[in-house]
Image: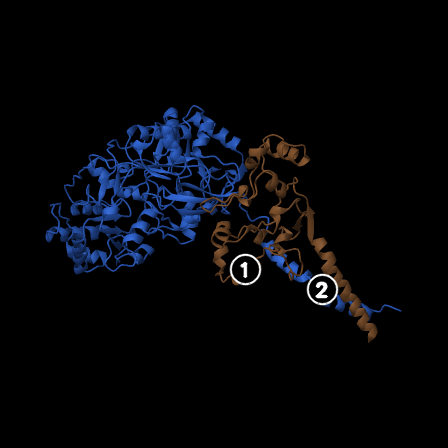
Chain colours: A brown, B blue
Amino acid sequence: MKRNLLIFGVGMALALVTGWAAFPHALYVRRAQPLEFRHKTHAEKSGLAQCDSCHLLGTNGEFGGIAEVESCAGCHADKMGTSKAEATLVDSYIKPSRETPWLVYSRQPANVWFSHAIHTRRAGLACKDCHGSMGESDQQRIYEQNRISGYSRDIWGHSMSRLERAPGDGMKMSDCEDCHHRRNVEVGCLGCHK
Amino acid sequence: MKFTRRDLLISTAGAAAGLVLSPVPWKLLSDASIWTQNFPWIPQPAHGPVGTKYSTCTLCEGGCGIRVRMAGKCPVGVVGVSAHPLTKGALCPLAFAAHQLNWHPRRLREVRHDGRAASWSEALAAFRKASSEGPIGIVDGRPGRAASSVFEAFTQKQQGSYQAVLSAESQALAPYADWSGVPVASLGYDMENARTVVSFGAPLLDGWGIPGRFTHLWADRAAGASDPQLRLIQIEPALSRTAARAWQWVPIRGGSETQLAAGLARVLLEERLVKSAGPMPHLTLDDAAAQTGLSAGGIRDLARTMAENRPVVAIAADGNPAIAALNDLLGAVAAPGGIVRIKEDTTPHVPDAASSPLRAMLLDSTVPWEFAAQADAEVFRFAAWDGGGNTAGWLLPAPGFLEELTDVPTPPTSARETYSVAMNLAAPATEVQSAAQFLLNVDATLPAVDKVIHARCEGIFRARQGTVYGEQTLALSKIDSAQHLEEQLRKGAVWMGDPPRDGRFRCELKEWPTGVGVSPAASWATAWALPVLPALATKLYQESTLRELPVGRQA
């Protein structure tokens, strides 16, 4: 009997180790951003301390998302320093007027309608409530792409169990619903899936 | 210690239990469900900054104002524009989903010749050969556009034939044009000032005329009221959507509209409910009642209702002269709330006639799909979308919704002259060409569409009258240059002309018309089937039952 329990336990332990330790490595492919970008440097040295300095939020609620290369060209029309990242930006994207293929950590499926204006202006949420401390980062994290869904690991969150998560870690539909419930805000299918 | 088959089964059971307690099955289930949203064959809108563009709907010739939500350079949503002077934010159901039509499975994506894939260069070579061998006929579904000027210029140079297909709404105005000499394009309905609208089968709430215009009028002045400001009386055999929303539905026998109009006219004249002394119909009231399936009392009540709630205008579904004569009798011609003249143009468009049999025909994408050529000619058929079962030799993919620069002249039924421009906001997924662009490739000396639009803007600017409705509402006299006007129009503004100084015209009617139907076919083009919908809209509109087909028409 003891022997059977031991063999059962070994099989179970192997599966648990595989599931919790090896599976995430197999599921996510690690991809580097096209060039290095430092939010902190831009905030401290260039006076772009506010998120909407680059991620424009118009008065009519339209959100610009990731800044287009035209915005970058406002300062980086020519190289200002000696960094390799800036050289790549100027030579590969600004001069040929080609958009930088950023890997967006928070990219949602196309069937989701989301208004940044409603969440920041009406609900008073800070950017980091959903995006974490992205704006204070001194280097970009490796982008981990789910091999099956194609989305970033940030959508599920970095904890595979989703039990203990920092603010902004995880952007699944259930996270939106939880936040709405906590704040007593109505939540319905057509609110986001129009 | 020997590892037995039993041990293997026990360890497998343990692994299975462990797997359930790991994230593997649950995460895979979650990811697989998301993966199904991202099948590679599902078109995904491009990523990019979300913005808004204003434009004019080009699905039909109605020209409703639209606000287009853009993600990057891709339209992802369409709503109405509340500042639009005619539609005031209302749209037809099709327009709300118009941005999706470009991704319709039946979208034409390649040149086809006799059912086989071909190339643009082959089509061009075949058209060049045809035009060198004989006259070309061009059929235009929406005359008056800049592209129409290109067609006319080509056929004039080539001594071919340019034919415009009148919409059902325009054909309904044809009797007034015949009797007064005012061109159809200079006539419209002043429904904003009407108190009663009597529709003889015209689908007023199902995409008729300028679809957003009457939808807004009905919603604003009639919906839900037992004694509305605008009384809509719908006369037709079936309880259509328009009939279901009308103040009064008058079910008559199919095809008896002429007899009902005669019966109404007889009551109006006999009971002296109208001032004018028009010709008396030959049909008696009892005969009209017997033929329409209504009672004589019912026809009498309807006539009294019309006379008591003026201004009243009767609207025909086609070119029925009896209904036009009824309007004349009611004093609704050249009067507020009735048939009005929108400009002082007195030159009717005379279709060109080909000097010899046509060698080939070019059908613009605005010509309804079911339109079939009678002439023995090689057919070059432009269309954004394949409606199936077409006998055209050449099928040429045309730009879809908001994929080409075009202008939108005054739509049929409008009570005021208008002009707007629809920009090419979306990039086509495959190589497409408009018919005008195709002709420019054949003959580079033809005027380009953008130059014609520029010239038209200059013409409007020189006239110095009207108002521009855009980001701001501005009198044209406040706009400093034609270039500024064109910029405004390209940004989605619409110019609306002032009413003509002299809007008078008279319909000379000596006897009550007995004939039915449209004006006699003047050419091989007007003898074709009555168009109802633009080619792009036909299939989806009909299959989605958003609009019922006219009586006798098969899907």
The amino acid marked with disc number 1 is Cys
Q: Label 1, secondary structure: give it.
A: helix
Whether residue B299 is visible here, answered yes or no, is: yes
Return the residue nearer the eye: B411 or B194: B194
Return the residue nearer the eye: A75 or B393: A75
Tag of residue B72:
none
Position in image of residue B165 (x %, y %): 34, 38
Return the residue nearer the eye: A59 or B211: A59
The subunit letter for the residue under badge 1 reads A
Position in image of residue B73 (x %, y %): 50, 40
Q: Nearer the viewer, mark 2 or mark 1?
A: 1
- Crowd band around label 2 with a 10 angstrom C-alpha radius: few (<14), some (14–19), many (20+): many
Q: Residue at x 32, y 40 (%)?
A: B411
Q: Is residue A153 left or right of residue B202?
A: right
Return the residue nearer the eye: B99 or B330: B99
Q: How many marks?
A: 2
Q: The N terminus of chain B is located in which quarter?
A: bottom right
Task: Indicate the quadrant where residue A34 lies.
Answer: top right
Whether residue B357 is visible here, answered yes or no, is: no
Residue corresponding to mark 2: B19
Q: Is residue A131 left or right of residue A22?
A: left
Q: Is residue B466 left or right of residue B36?
A: left
Q: Residue at x 24, y 32 (%)?
A: B346
The amino acid marked with disc number 2 is Leu
Tag of residue A179:
1
The subunit letter for the residue under badge 2 reads B
Task: Indicate the quadrant where residue B17 lies.
Answer: bottom right
Q: Label 2, secondary structure: give it.
A: helix
